[in-house]
Amino acid sequence: MGAIPLSTWAMLAEIIGGFSIVTGLIVGWFQIRHHRSQQRNAVAINLAQTFYNRDFAQAVVRMQHVPDNVSLKELRAMGREYEDAAITVCTSFETMGLLVYKRIAELDLVLDLAGGIVAVMRRKLDQWLVDVREEQAQPSWAEWFNWLGDRALERKKQSPPAHLAYKNWR
């Protein structure tokens, strides 16, 4: 048995190196997928915690008694607590809308979690948003709440609510 030629060692080193690179790419791909999954879960938990906020919950309850398309003047006539509630609702959903647009949170997740509430609040506050933007000379005020609300309203027209769509789910 003779010595293994240097060219054979070089070829083996290339094969091992190529295998290491491919293995590293595969492991990296799985790590990226795992990281994205963890990030998605963290975002979902943080979004869900929004609904455990007492101020937000009280704001939603208060806003349920407001008629659709309430104006700024009408809302102010109802009392400061109603305007505060509208601002709390808008700022909470503003954050969610921006997270969806930046693809940090998935639209389906946010709409499954809060689509009904977003759609109702968007419908109730439509005219109020127009009036506040005009009064403040700020056309971008609550723009991401507006955007998310439009997505929620579109979805509500296209699919039945979860309690009906998945009533036979096991």
Image (cartoon, rainbow, N blue to C red):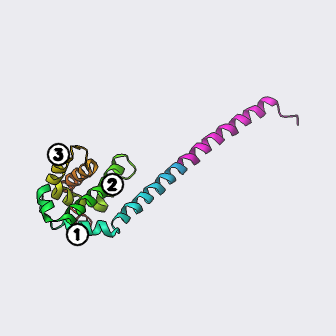
Residue at 20% of width from left, 56% of height from top? 122
Report which residue position mark 3 lands on.
134
Label 1 residue SS: helix
Report which residue position mark 2 lands on.
96
Number of marks: 3
Residue at 40% of width from left, 50% of height from top? 104
Binning the other alpha carbons within 10 Å of mark 1 as few (below 14), some (14 to 19) or many (20 upward) gives few
Q: Amino acid at mark 1?
A: Val
Position of residue 14 measured from the top left corner of the image (x, y, whole percent): 70, 34
Q: Main secondary structure of the magenta part?
A: helix
| Residue range of the region highlighted in magenta in the rendering | 1-29
Report which residue position mark 1 lands on.
61
- Of mark 3 and mark 1, the one earlier in the sequence is 1
Q: Amino acid at mark 3?
A: Glu
Q: Amino acid at mark 2?
A: Met
Give the farthest residue toward the top: 7
Position of residue 107 measured from the top left corner of the image (x, y, whole percent): 32, 52
Note whether 148 is above or below 85 in the view shown: above
